Amino acid sequence: MPNPTIEWGPLESTRDNSVCRVTWVLLTADPIGTAISLPEFADKTWVIGTNAGDGFGGATCSLKGRNLTTETALTLNKAATGATATAAAAAVIATIENPLYVYPELTSVGAGATVTVTLTARRPNILRH
């Protein structure tokens, strides 16, 4: 499983740690990202496959979530449409649900896929102006 890279900067609002960016690189040979837990970050926007060098090669990326590490994962839903949060080409997706664990997965791995998935998450901060 590819481990994500987590950044607290250089993002706007990093002084209060209310925004973070998490990046996974999924490959045909390594299609499931390591799950992360950010439940206090309710606003989650995912950018899928837009980096230079990304190629789906027939792969489909699904955004997954679960509340326990042992339960069956569920595909998250798009905030705009309620449809499942999947992409077979470059996409930006905001998700509705906020499970305890989230991660991306190439549910159809394709041939020679390299798909970068970046999650930008924001938690409410009543002290921010």
Image (cartoon, rainbow, N blue to C red):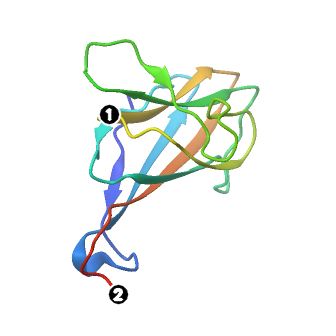
x, y percent for residue 129: 35, 87
In the rendered view, would you say 17 is above or below 45? below
Identify which amino acid the numbered label 1 is placed on: Tyr
Q: Which mark is residue 83?
A: none
| Residue type indicated by callout 2 | His
Q: Is residue 96 left or right of residue 84?
A: left
Q: Secondary structure at mark 1?
A: strand
Number of labelled discs?
A: 2
In this view, the residue farthest toward the bottom is 129
Who's the residue at 76% across and 26% down the image? 58
Whether residue 112 sits left or right of residue 67 in the image: it is right
Quarter of the figure with residue 15? bottom left
Residue 98 on image: x %, y %: 39, 40
The answer to whether residue 63 is left or right of residue 38 is: right
Give how far across and how far down residue 20 sits, in percent: 35, 62
Local crowd at mark 2 within 10 Å, few (<14), some, or many (≥20)? few
Which residue is at a point 37% across and 77% down the rendered structure image?
10
Which residue: 29% across, 26% down?
67
Q: Is residue 21 above or below residue 73?
A: below
Quadrant position of residue 33:
top left
**Mark 1: few, some, or many residues within 10 Å (few <14, many ≥20)?**
some
Q: Is residue 49 above or below residue 58?
A: below
Q: Is 16 in front, or is 58?
A: 16
Name the N-terminal-most of marks 1 and 2: 1
Circle on res. 129: 2
Question: Does 75 sit above or below residue 9?
Answer: above
Q: Residue at x 59, y 20 (%)?
A: 107
Look at mark 1 in the image and give the residue it sits on: 101
Taking depth in this image into account, of 9 and 29 the one nearest to the observer is 9
Q: Position of residue 126 (x, y in %)?
A: 27, 74
Tag nearer the camera, 1 or 2: 2
User: Foreground: 123 or 10?
Assistant: 123
